Image (spheres, rainbow, N blue to C red):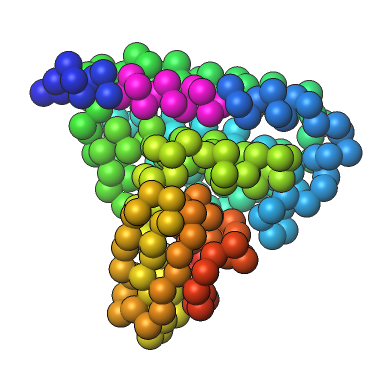
Amino acid sequence: MTSDAHLADIAAQLDTVAAATERLLPAVAALGEADLVDPSLLPGWTRGHVLAHLSRNADSLVNLLLWARTGIETPQYASQFLRNADIEAGAPRPLRDQLEDLTASAERWLALARVMPADRWPATVRNRMGGEIPATRVIWMRRLEVEIHHVDLAIGYTPADWSPEFTARLLAQSATEVEPAADAGFTLTATDTGYTATVGNPTTAVSGPAASLAAWLIGRSSGADLTGDLPDLAAWK
C-alpha cells in the first residue's frame, strides 16, 4: 500500500517536473526558426532533433504509465528503429509545430501522472534498455530528460542552473553508472557540497563543483573546470 507520505512525495516530484517544463517552454518559444537547424550540444543533433526527442520521450513515458496503470505491457518505444525515425522526422519541423508538440506531449504525460491510482505506482515496468523499474522511477526519468536536454539546446541554460537537489541526485546516480576505461578508476569530491564517491579502483582524484562533476560524468562537459587527471569515460546511458 502506498502511504500518504509517499503520495505527497510523488506529488512533489511531479511538481518539480512541471517546474522544469515551465522553464523550458518559454526558452524554446523565444527561439527563431533559424535556431532550430543550428547544432545542439549533442553530436549529430540539431536543436530540432533535441526538441523532437523531448516530445517523443514524453509520449514514451505515457506508455510506461499506461503499462503500470492497466497491467498491460506497453513498451516505452515500439523499437529503437522507430524511436530514431520519429526523431529524424520531427527534427525539421517549424518552431510553431515543435512548440505545440512539446507543450502537448508534456501536458499529456503530466496529466496522466497526476491521476495515477495510488496502488499502481509500485507496479514494475521496463525502460527502453530492458531494465525493470517501479513506475515511480518514470517521474525521475522525465525530469532528467527535461533538465539535461534543456542544457543540450545550448540556449543559455547550463548545469550551473540545475537546482542543488537535482544536481545532488544526478551526481550520485551518474557516479554509480559511469564506466571509466580499464584501470582508470578515480575518486570524486564536490568542493561545494562535500559529496565524495569512488569509481572503480582509483588511480587519480577529480574535484570541482557538484554541477560540473555531474555534467562531466554524463558527457555534457569536457571537465575543463575540474581539477585532476580526468580519465576517458564511456557514453552515459
Q: Position of residue 224 (x, y in %)?
A: 62, 66
Asked whether 15 falls inside the magenta stretch, the response is: yes
- Vertical side of 19 occupied by 196: above or below: below
Q: Quadrant of residue 118?
A: top left
Q: Nearer the viewer, residue 62 or 39?
A: 39
Q: Position of residue 237 (x, y in %)?
A: 46, 57
Q: Is residue 203 visible?
A: yes
Q: Position of residue 108 (x, y in %)?
A: 51, 20
The magenta span reads 10-21
Q: Position of residue 222 (x, y in %)?
A: 61, 65
**Image-based side of 107 in relation to 32, left or right:** left
Task: Please name the residue shown 71% across and 29% down the image.
Answer: 27
Q: Quadrant of residue 197?
A: bottom left
Task: Please name the residue shown 14% across and 20% down the image.
Answer: 3
Counting the numbered discs, the total is 0
Asked whether 161 falls inside the magenta stretch, the response is: no
